[in-house]
Amino acid sequence: MTHQETYLARLQSLHASKHELAQKMMSLLNISKDAVYRRLRGDTSLSAEELLQLQKHYQLGYGEAANTSLFRFNFAERKIRSPTEYIDQLSERMERVQGLTGVNLLLAHPGIPFFHEMVYPRLLAFKLFIYGGTCWNFPGWQEAPFRPDFVDNKALDRAFEIGAYSYTIPGRELWTMGILNATIDQIEFMHLAGRFADESDAFGLLDDLGEMVDHLEAMARAGRKFVPGADAEEGGLFHPAHNELANNDNSILIQSDQAQLLFAIYLTPNFLQTSNPIVCEMSRTWFDLVDELSSPLGAAGGRHRGWFFNRLRKQLTSARERLHSESSIEF
């Protein structure tokens, strides 16, 4: 019996019937009756976020794997008072990963994966600025105009090191056609709100996104991850894929010879972390299933890879045209 079958059987034991469990899951997960029964039959794997919602409600133990703190929440460990403190948390975890062997990275994200943003300092500064004024609620950040130097350069340098190290780790990534949407929307919203100290930075951020798209395509074509300007042959093996059927997952699974470790994004960019073997194995099973249903964008991607990246460039062209129409800058 798989981990998912075992877990769902335990849930069913808490209900009078499978119908009652299905009704409860529809409510908790906000999915259709048909989607629930696909999960109960094992045709579809529970995502990490769905498992988290069920676990929040039922609080089931896992026998020998039981743990009252199944998930660790980074924001609860230490309140984040600056971008530097968030980067510190990421650095501490990356140092632990560096001590593992046979590391492999599985990543599913509806937007731009954070590791890729880390090698573009202005873009990362913008994202950290957004987080500082929203989920971290730094005093004064909600009204302040964005400037690239608003975030300390030392924090950006350390983030670049994390991004560069992630490029040495072999891995697979699931992308959607909406990978740029959130960032483009943030840029346009801030521009309309007059929240750029220098309006040209809004266009500069679109330039950064354009460079990122070019570089992601170069890595996909090479089948290797590498920092812009570095030797592609020295990077980790890279297998990106395009899938629109399961585009709401937001998780990173680190596999190694020693253990598996799952990071589920919660209140972006904060995250929940667990090494629970059942949760990690269910996440890996879900990832493998979705990956099989995806179109490869890597070295064997061919025409689909070209189509995918050209669509992303068209999105950036449209965003630039909208900014031009609303800009006070003469072009």
Image (cartoon, helix red, strand yellow):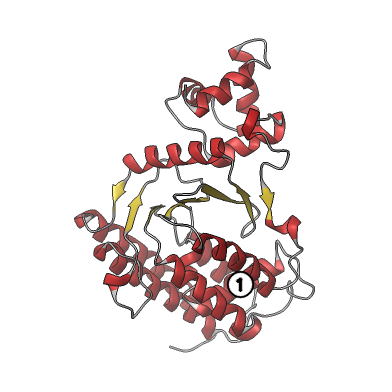
- Residue furthest to the right in view is 139
- Residue at the disc numbered 1: 190
Give the secondary structure at mark 1. helix
Whether 2 is drawn above or below 259: the answer is: above
Q: Position of residue 168 (x, y in %)?
A: 39, 66
Lateral position of residue 59 relative to residue 148, left or right? right
- Quarter of the C terminus within the rendering: bottom left
Residue nearest the observer in this picture, 91 or 197: 91
Q: Answer yes or no: is residue 302 visible.
A: yes
Q: Position of residue 192 (x, y in %)?
A: 60, 73
Q: Report crowding for label 1: few under 14, some 14 to 19, many 20 or more residues within 10 A (C-alpha).
A: some
Specify the quadrant of the image occupied by residue 12.
Answer: top right
Specify the quadrant of the image occupied by residue 57.
Answer: top right
**Residue plotted at (69% across, 71% down):** 85
**Residue plotted at (52% across, 79% down):** 121
Kindly identify the amino acid type of the residue bearing the numbered disc 1. Answer: Met
Q: Position of residue 227 (x, y in %)?
A: 38, 75
- Residue furthest to the top in view is 16
Residue nearest the observer in this picture, 35 or 95: 95
Lateral position of residue 274 relative to residue 256, left or right? right
Q: Position of residue 138 (x, y in %)?
A: 76, 71
Counting labels gives 1
**Residue plotted at (56% across, 61% down):** 96
**Residue plotted at (39% across, 64% down):** 315
